[in-house]
Image (cartoon, rainbow, N blue to C red):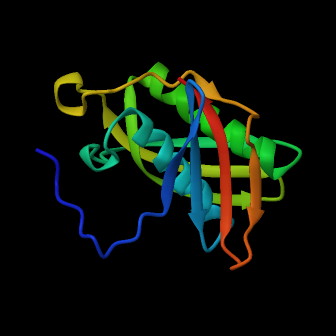
Amino acid sequence: MQPLRPETVPRSWEHFPHQADIGVRGIGATKETAFERAAQALTAVITDPESVAPTQSVPIVCEAPDDELLLVDWLNALVYEMATRKMLFSRFNVHFNDHSLHATAWGEPIEVARHQPAVEVKGATYTELSVKQDERGRWVVQCVVDV
């Protein structure tokens, strides 16, 4: 049984259609928050993020010459950690230092019966890749992930 989500809580991540793959988008008041929410959207491609208990932490460090490439590296680092550790993540803490990202992802080992993974994400791509502020000053980060 999935927990009920109050209708008053705005969702700050979303999916967008893209042929056979799926786009992930994170939206936040800061770039850090937008990257964290893109990671939540990545998890939501696989399972309900609220079904994943944040019991184990995994440190992640990425470096890239610009924010767009850093987003792809961040999401691909999460895909790698999910695959090699056989984990799912539901909570993220991201900090930037120039063009490096220092993060912690919290999650738990995959339990197929409980998490019911829908697909396996193979990786983040450069398709629809964007890291920018919108007209309201919010950070919007996105790309398509290969499933």
Residue nearest the viewer, comparing 143 with 58: 143
**Among the 4 quarters of the image, the one containing residue 146:** top right
Residue farthest along the right direction in this orientation:
65
Residue nearest the viewer, comparing 63 with 47: 47
Residue at left offset 75%, top offset 43%: 129
Left or right of 70 on screen, residue 111: left
**Residue 145 placed where, x, y %?**
60, 32
Q: Is residue 137 above or below residue 80?
A: below
**Residue 24 placed where, x, y %?**
57, 44
Q: Quadrant of the N terminus?
A: top left
Q: Total of numbered circles in the picture? A: 0
**Residue 87 placed where, x, y %?**
38, 30
Residue at left offset 68%, top offset 67%: 139
Q: Is residue 12 above or below residue 135?
A: above
Residue nearest the viewer, comparing 126 with 19: 19
Left or right of 64 on screen, residue 45: left
Residue at left offset 61%, top offset 74%: 29
Residue at left offset 76%, top offset 34%: 126
